[in-house]
Image (cartoon, rainbow, N blue to C red):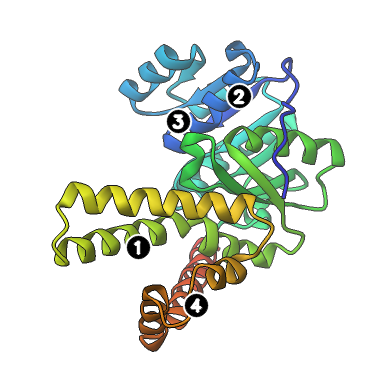
Amino acid sequence: MQKTTSCPSSQAPIAFIGGGNMARALIGGLVARGISAHTIRVAEPVESSRDALVADFGVAAFAAAADAVRDADTWLFAIKPQVMRKVCADLSTTAQMARPLVVSIAAGITSNQLDHWLGGKLSVIRAMPNTPALLGEGVTGLFANAATSAVQRGAAQALLASAGATVWIEDEALMDAVTAVSGSGPAYVFLLAEAMQSAGEAQGLPAPVARLLAQQTLLGASQMLIHDDADAAGLRRRVTSPGGTTQAAIESLQAGGFEQLIATAIAAATERGRALAQAND
């Protein structure tokens, strides 16, 4: 896994197709790290969102994708999977003339599908960031098709690194598992936080106190996972004293099938990603 401070070339225009939260996170990260806002173009159909992008970042915003991609070397698709085929079809003639590096953050859409919808024989990178990217603390799984050069891989990695760490996946079939673990993963943590707060309140803690205890516990534990040399299992054993309160809690979770529930959840999310790709064939 890598967390780089390099940036894409400040001279190469980048077009974002879609200006939602994830696009905003990436744009904000690029601008903060020295990329000129004048080289960033965004296609966003909602006028109020376009106005906000211009006001917040100083980028150029367009209603039509065809206007945003003009002369851009990199096209980043940040739109819903359900509309990807039509948007790509509308841009296919331009894509075949411009031969851009194509990056997609849409879940369940394969590199082959993107390449086919854009006319074929393009450099395509499939990326899966997660919502902590909004704070610059995300992680992105990346897969590049065979047409993508080492230079293009580097450019895409620098672009996505504006949102956090990056990791390359060499087998695209595993991208659905990346989506299930990290793309959907923040929701699992939020659900755990909800459950911890509710349980604390049930034991008599005031809601604000239970909320803060859950928040800071999850934050501190995450920092330990990142900065301690021990793996998750080792850290768990370290804080689980024999016969203590933590052991009682862990045994209760395991008796309820906690690990199997997580495995089942991630398998379900992985399968849903595969189904999305099949539905768009």
Q: How far apart are marks 1 and 4 (CA)?
A: 15 Å
Number of residues whose C-alpha sits closer than 10 Å to that of mark 3, classed few (under 14), some (14–19) or many (20 or more): many
Indicate the amino acid at tag 2. Answer: Leu
Disc number placed over residue 19 in the picture, else none = 3
Q: Is residue 248 above or below residue 137?
A: below
Q: Distance between the residues labelled 2 and 1?
A: 32 Å
Question: Mark 4 sits on what residue?
Answer: 263
Indicate the amino acid at tag 1. Answer: Leu
User: Which residue is at a point 40% across and 77% down the rendered structure image?
Assistant: 244
Nearer mark to the viewer, of 3 and 4? 4
Number of residues whose C-alpha sits closer than 10 Å to that of mark 1, classed few (under 14), some (14–19) or many (20 or more): some
**SS for dot 2:** helix
**SS for dot 4:** helix
User: Which residue is at a point 45% across and 30% down the rendered structure image?
Assistant: 19
Indicate the amino acid at tag 4. Answer: Ala
Q: How far apart are marks 1 and 3 (CA)?
A: 30 Å
Question: Mark 1 sits on what residue?
Answer: 192
How many numbered marks have been drawn onto this rendered protein structure? 4
Q: Which of marks 3 and 4 is nearer the N terminus?
A: 3
Nearer mark to the viewer, of 2 and 4? 4
Nearer mark to the viewer, of 1 and 4? 1
**SS for dot 1:** helix
Q: Could you tell me which quadrant the C terminus lies in?
A: bottom right
Disc number placed over residue 30 in the picture, else none = 2
**SS for dot 3:** loop
Q: Which of marks 2 and 3 is nearer the N terminus?
A: 3
Q: Which of marks 2 and 1 is nearer the N terminus?
A: 2
Write down the quadrant of residue 210 in the picture. Answer: bottom left
Indicate the amino acid at tag 3. Answer: Gly
Which x, y percent locates residue 160?
Answer: 64, 38
Q: How far apart are marks 2 and 4 (CA)?
A: 35 Å
- Is the Cβ of the residue at disc 2 closer than 8 Å to that at disc 4? no
